[in-house]
């Protein structure tokens, strides 16, 4: 350790003096802290955080970055290999986002417990001992900073609370990559230590008997030198964190499931309003009501007609659309924010509309809404248009769509992110492959 000061070019006596003048930093004295407990929290995160990461990146791809409609648009070197998001199984995006948001929330207590278990390291003195130590601490700053940033921005977003003055998606995406890099480095550096920590005690023995005796000091800096009296057993600590995670999970899953499950989704701010609270087919959650879209109600009246363009143009009124062959499919709407609802939709298959305007094998379809603003348009892939269950829906559960659900017509495509299931459709432009 004599080299520590020398690496920075400090004379050794000065370095030693810095080490001696420890400021009055808090002393962390819980006898619970130790390498085994930290390793237990670590292994849970090591297994489950990659699921949150991967589903997050898949959601970015599902948005269709190839059409410039994933946010952020230009991500430079962070561009993911593009592929067309599948339409099957129809619950693919529902599962993806249920996992991303649900597991992300469930892991919050585990992340907090892990940070609590290593907090003495934050107050280490001297703050840096060598260049390697300085780099390690910098990577930890990025690791902890980015995961807290992802948690806070993620939760604020699903709470519909855009308090930040920047784009949620751009920030969450960039933060994710910082986290991925720091997480990978951390795993490489700490994996052996985690394995040693896990091996140092038997989980079964810990769970069987409540132990409060301190773990032996392995020099990791986690075990308090002057421990305070125990407040709870290690088993109690695991039960507290596990119970917290289970409670968050129980209050969240309902948003991805339908029916009675939704009543238990207490953490869900959205989807509590329903379009028509009459127990009928339109009585299911709505995010954005017709009134808040700002569309003039007259524009959805008898004069409404759908404009189609391809190699030839067509204009179809609602009765004309209803006179075409109808198809019915039970499909979810799954929002990026994790909530979803499965309904029975009926309408005209998009591929029939494509064929009608001379593009039987479309490469894309640009759907425009009567609305302006962020939901004004969305582009579908050729594969999405050609799925037989992809619809321009006119009805839900056998009744005409309520204004809040997109009357006169809305897009429903299996496994498509909810945001691209455009409501109040005005026109569709089919592009060639
Ligand atoms: N025109 C338009 N279409 C839209 C939206 C919208 O605000 N305007 N919301 C989108 C989003 S984000 C989702 S998740 C689905 C379902 O939203 P809803 O509950 O508001 O119908 O519709 C999508 N289609
Ligand atoms: Mo959404």
Image: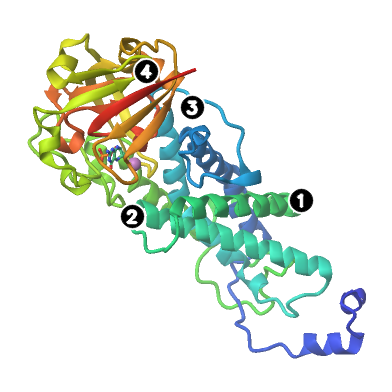
Q: Is residue 290 or residue 415 the one in the foreground?
A: 290
In front of the other: label 3 or label 1? 3
Q: Find disc 3 in the rendering and name its residue.
A: 85
Check disc 1 and report its element: helix, strand or loop.
Answer: helix
The answer to whether residue 88 shows anywhere in this view is: no
Q: Is residue 383 or residue 302 the one in the foreground?
A: 302
In front of the other: label 1 or label 2? 2
Residue 21 image-quadrant placement: bottom right
Residue at (70% x, 66% y) in the render: 138
Q: Find disc 4 in the rendering and name its residue.
A: 310
Question: Upstream in the sequence, badge 3 or badge 1?
Answer: 3
Q: Is residue 223 above or below residue 408?
A: below
Q: Is residue 268 left or right of residue 17?
A: left
Q: Find disc 1 in the rendering and name its residue.
A: 192
The answer to whether residue 418 shows anywhere in this view is: yes
Counting from the top left corner in percent of width and height, residue 414 is at 37, 24
Counting from the top left corner in percent of width and height, residue 160 is at 32, 54
Q: What number is the disc on residue 159? A: 2
Query: Marks 3 and 2: CB-CB under 8 Å?
Result: no
Question: Upstream in the sequence, badge 3 or badge 4?
Answer: 3
Query: Marks 3 and 1: CB-CB under 8 Å?
Result: no
Q: Is mark 4 within 8 Å of ligand 1?
A: no
Q: Badge 4: how crowded within 10 Å, few (<14), some, or many (20+)?
A: many
Question: Upstream in the sequence, badge 2 or badge 4?
Answer: 2
């Amino acid at each position: 350790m004599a080299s520590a000061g020398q690496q920075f070019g400090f004379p050794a006596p000065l370095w030693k003096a810095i080490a001696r003048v420890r400021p009055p930093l808090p002393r962390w004295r819980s006898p619970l802290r130790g390498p085994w407990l930290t390793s237990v929290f670590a292994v849970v995160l090591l297994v489950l955080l990659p699921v949150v990461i991967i589903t997050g990146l898949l959601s970015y791809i599902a948005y269709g970055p190839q059409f410039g409609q994933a946010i952020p648009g230009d991500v430079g070197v962070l561009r993911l290999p593009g592929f067309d998001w599948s339409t099957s199984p129809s619950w693919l995006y529902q599962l993806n986002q249920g996992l991303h948001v649900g597991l992300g929330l469930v892991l919050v207590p585990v992340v907090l417990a892990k940070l609590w278990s290593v907090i003495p390291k934050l107050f280490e003195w001297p703050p840096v001992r060598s260049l390697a130590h300085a780099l390690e601490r910098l990577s930890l700053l990025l690791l902890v900073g980015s995961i807290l940033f992802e948690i806070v921005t993620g939760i604020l977003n699903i709470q519909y609370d855009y308090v930040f003055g920047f784009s949620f998606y751009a920030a969450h995406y960039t933060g994710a990559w910082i986290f991925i890099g720091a997480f990978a480095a951390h795993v490489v550096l700490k994996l052996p230590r985690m394995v040693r920590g896990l091996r140092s005690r038997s989980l079964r023995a810990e769970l069987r008997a409540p132990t409060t005796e301190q773990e032996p000091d392995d020099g990791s800096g986690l075990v308090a030198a002057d421990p305070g009296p125990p407040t709870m057993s290690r088993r109690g600590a695991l039960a507290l964190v596990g119970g917290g995670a289970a409670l968050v999970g129980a209050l969240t899953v309902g948003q991805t499931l339908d029916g009675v499950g939704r009543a238990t989704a207490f953490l869900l701010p959205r989807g509590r309003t329903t379009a028509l609270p009459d127990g009928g087919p339109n009585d299911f959650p709505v995010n954005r009501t017709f009134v808040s879209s700002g569309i003039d109600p007259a524009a959805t009246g008898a004069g409404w007609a759908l404009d189609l363009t391809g190699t030839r143009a067509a204009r179809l009124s609602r009765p004309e659309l209803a006179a075409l062959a109808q198809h019915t499919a039970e499909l979810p709407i799954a929002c990026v924010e994790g909530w979803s609802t499965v309904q029975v939709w009926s309408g005209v298959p998009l591929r029939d509309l494509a064929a009608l305007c001379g593009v039987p094998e479309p490469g894309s379809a640009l759907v425009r809404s009567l609305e302006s603003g962020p939901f004004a348009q969305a582009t579908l892939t050729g594969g999405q248009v050609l799925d037989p269950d992809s619809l321009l829906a006119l009805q839900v559960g056998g009744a005409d769509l309520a204004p809040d659900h997109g009357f006169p017509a809305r897009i429903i495509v299996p496994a498509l992110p909810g945001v691209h299931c455009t409501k109040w459709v005005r026109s569709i432009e089919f592009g060639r492959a």
